Image: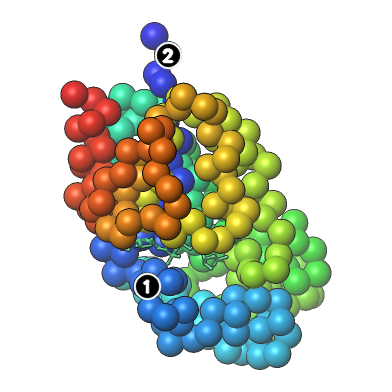
Amino acid sequence: MDKKKLVVLTGAGISAESGIKTFRDHNGLWENHDVTEVASPEGWARDPHLVLEFYNQRRKQLFECEPNPGHKGLVELEKHFDVQVITQNVDDLHEQAGSSHVLHLHGELKKVRSTKDESLVYELEGWELNWGDTCEKGAQLRPHIVWFGEAVPAIEEAIDIVHQADIFAVVGTSLNVYPAAGLLNYVRSGVPIYIIDPKQPAYQPTSQITFIQENAGTGVPKLIKLLTS
Ligand code: OAD
């Protein structure tokens, strides 16, 4: 028999227990920076050196992080379900844990791309991208990250995937940032939705939603129990 399709939307919260800070748990500051300063085209135009340095530090930190039981639990669920992860995270901790299907909505920290031709995307060796590092067409390379105000190219694929879900789960996202947050609207009616977050969500829970008020590290194992026993 075909396995049921479990689609999991993840956000910064799933990587928090691996040592990566979330965005909105710190008064809108991200690692002591105004998010728009370091994650927008305007910020890049104003001070590319600051932006490069900011992402270099995030990348360097990522090399010291490991997947936690939240990421690993989603891999374990592959024994029972056809699991598709849709993540807003730019880290690769889902891949490191061994998830087979991961769609990155907001780009990938370990990749860089050309500022002249966005189809030119490269795996960065090591953690450092510098001013003066160029693509094969001679243009400056930038982080392969979707910044505020930029389009989210993977959103159409994500909508298709969400539409196919037999079960939908949300782990560690404040659901503040669109279009990612809007994916919830594409879950078919009658499909059960599980939300794992230590903080009560701002929206009204419905009978379709089961809320697990836990960190990902304990919440995902609870989800496994709920779905497999
Ligand atoms: P947020 O920082 O907005 O939300 C993190 C969520 O994780 C909050 O709801 C926290 O309560 C929850 N959380 C904290 N610790 C947790 C834990 N141990 N286990 C589970 N949940 C925990 O992060 P996102 O929703 O991911 O975009 O933010 C969305 C986007 O905003 C990001 O992808 C980023 C940012 O701007 C870009 O960089 C383009």
Rendering coords of residue 184 (x, y %): 53, 42
The secondary element bearing badge 1 is classed as loop
Where is residue 188, by image quadrant? top right
| Residue at (25% x, 51% y) in the render | 213
Residue 2's disc is 2
In the picture shown, does residue 200 fall above or below 57?
A: above
In the rendered image of this protein, does residue 58 appear above or below residue 154? Answer: below
Rendered-image quarter of ligand 1? bottom left
The residue at the point 41 percent across, 21 percent down is 4
The crowding category of the residue bearing disc 2, from other C-alpha atoms within 10 Å (few below 14, some 14 to 19, many at least 20), is: few
Circle 1 Cα neighbour tier, 10 Å, few/some/many (<14 / 14–19 / ≥20): few
Question: In the figure, is residue 106 to the left or right of 220?
Answer: right
Q: Residue at x 43, y 87 (%)?
A: 32
Secondary structure found at label 2: loop
Q: Quadrant of the C terminus?
A: top left
Mark 1 Cβ inside 8 Å of ligand 1: yes
